[in-house]
Image (cartoon, grey):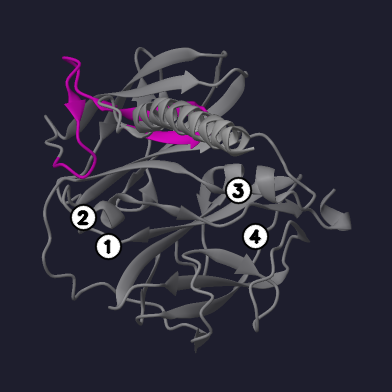
Amino acid sequence: MKKYFIAIIMLMVFVFGFYAFFHKVVRDDNSTSISQNQKTSKSGDREEVGADTIEYGLNRLDGKYIDNGSTLTPKNNEVNVNVSINHHLNEQREYGLIILEDFKQAPFSLENQKELSKYLFTMNPNSSKDILVKVPVKQDTKEITFLIIKKPSYKLKEMDLNRASILEEVLSMRYPLKHTNKLDNLKEVKPTNVIKDGLNEEMFITDNKDKLQSVVVAKEGKRLSFSTGNDSNKPLRYAVIALKDWKQTKIINDKEVVYTTVPKAERNLFDFTLPDVKKDSNFQLLAFPYPYQVSEDNYESQQTFGSLRTVIEPSEHNK
């Protein structure tokens, strides 16, 4: 009997030891894989979709990568760069390119083409693309922003959080042309309300002033609210713009850019009206933290926060 128990104990020790060894090998292999997937790409920023990625960034004409937040130096009042996209997805996808000069949509041209306000293009599965862009800039321009829109023609008219979150994210690259330490001359818009409820989403369109309630579809001219939130422990300034089918449109009091400073751990609420449309149109608000103060060492200043997209439908008389 004693030998029987000893045999059982030895078998358990062997099984446990084998399991521990096997688990360690598998865990170590997985850790290596995860670490490799999460490394920062040398060719720029990246969006991760499961195991798939989108790498994007700006390169000089000689191929050298330009760090996000670093200073761009125009030549003859023109910025010439390559927008580089590596589409590591097993699907065909449409993208849109928009460029902002001090948060206002700027004209640009591609190689041997006329000026555009937006550029739509399609990427094949697992493909790469370099887009040579020429952007004329004014002498007093402080910041230039390159925005890549995912699936710009796709209109989501039902509440699908999976797809909505993919469409919400705008891939952005922000660069200073001139460093500005003081911004006392920015005229801010007074919010309708300042709310402290913990719902500090950076940018959100809602039809309920008491909570954040998504607006997937709405008629032109509908009165809504947008919320800019601040989860940090210090005040945060934003520049806010609106895009209707990827062309900039006015938001409040005929302003194309709304500046606002949000108190720490609070959110500002603004009333606004959806613009008129002639057909179903995508509408999105974008919030840019630290306007005109983007830098390499402040990652948050390089970001852009989008609202969930809203599809604006024309009223009966506009159809």
Q: Who comes first in sequence, dot 4 or dot 1? A: 4
- How many tags in the picture? 4
Report the residue marked by disc 2: 298
Q: Determine whether, in the image, residue 108 is placed left or right of residue 17.
A: left
Instruction: Give the crowd class for mark 1: few <14, some 14-19, many >=20 residues within 10 Å.
Output: some
Element under label 1? loop
The mark lying in front, picked from 4 and 3, is: 3
Q: Residue at coordinates 22% horizontally, 58% vertically from top-left?
A: 292
Instruction: Give the crowd class for mark 2: few <14, some 14-19, many >=20 residues within 10 Å.
Output: few
Measured in 3D between alpha carbons, the distance from the residue under mark 4 to the one under mark 3, in whole angstroms, is 23 Å
Q: Who comes first in sequence, dot 1 or dot 3? A: 3
Q: Who comes first in sequence, dot 4 or dot 3? A: 3
Measured in 3D between alpha carbons, the distance from the residue under mark 3 to the one under mark 2, in whole angstroms, is 25 Å
Magenta residues, as a range? 45-71
Position above or below: 287 against 52: below
Element under label 2? loop
Q: Who comes first in sequence, dot 4 or dot 2? A: 4
* Image spot of residue 210 (x, y percent): 65, 84
- Specify the farthest residue to the right: 316
Measured in 3D between alpha carbons, the distance from the residue under mark 1 to the one under mark 3, in whole angstroms, is 23 Å
* Image spot of residue 319 (x, y percent): 85, 48
* Numbered badge on residue 290: 1
Measured in 3D between alpha carbons, the distance from the residue under mark 2 to the one under mark 1, in whole angstroms, is 9 Å
Report the residue marked by disc 4: 275
Q: Determine whether, in the image, residue 316 is placed left or right of residue 152.
A: right
Element under label 4? loop
Q: Residue at coordinates 21% horizontally, 55% vertically from top-left?
A: 298
Report the residue marked by disc 3: 165
* Numbered badge on residue 195: none
Q: Where the N terminus falls, by quadrant?
A: top right
